[in-house]
Amino acid sequence: MEELLNDGSIRLHDYTDGIGIPLTGTSKEQVQKLKDIWPTLEDAQAIWPEDPWYYLEWLWWDIACPIDLADLPNIDIYEQA
């Protein structure tokens, strides 16, 4: 992730307050901030005990995705005919 931050491929945002606030600092500091705000498995089990992994996936993609997906590089996928 640090390499993607360094070359500008992605930018990390904190959505814990519902507003995408860009994380600042070095790539290493940004990754640490992401680790600090990300819920633990115990947090997920308390919220969604029947499937905590689903909760974390749902949180990542639908609620608090710290990677601004609009900033991901375009990747073309080619299908072999």
Image (cartoon, rainbow, N blue to C red):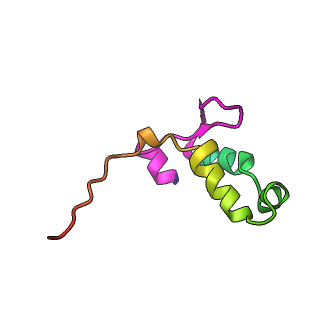
Q: Residue at x 74, y 63 (%)?
A: 52
Residue 35 screen position, x and y as percent: 69, 51
Residue 37 screen position, x and y as percent: 73, 45
Left or right, 31 with reference to 7: right
Left or right, 49 with reference to 33: right
* 54 or 3: nearer the viewer: 54
Q: Main secondary structure of the magenta part?
A: loop
| Residue at the limit of the structure toward the left, as seen here | 81
User: Disc count in the image?
Assistant: 0
Residue 75 screen position, x and y as percent: 31, 52
Q: Residue at x 52, y 52 (%)?
A: 2
* 31 or 65: nearer the viewer: 65
Q: Is residue 18 above or below residue 61?
A: above
Q: Which residues are magenta?
A: 2-27
Q: Quadrant of residue 43?
A: bottom right
Q: Is residue 26 above or below residue 2?
A: above
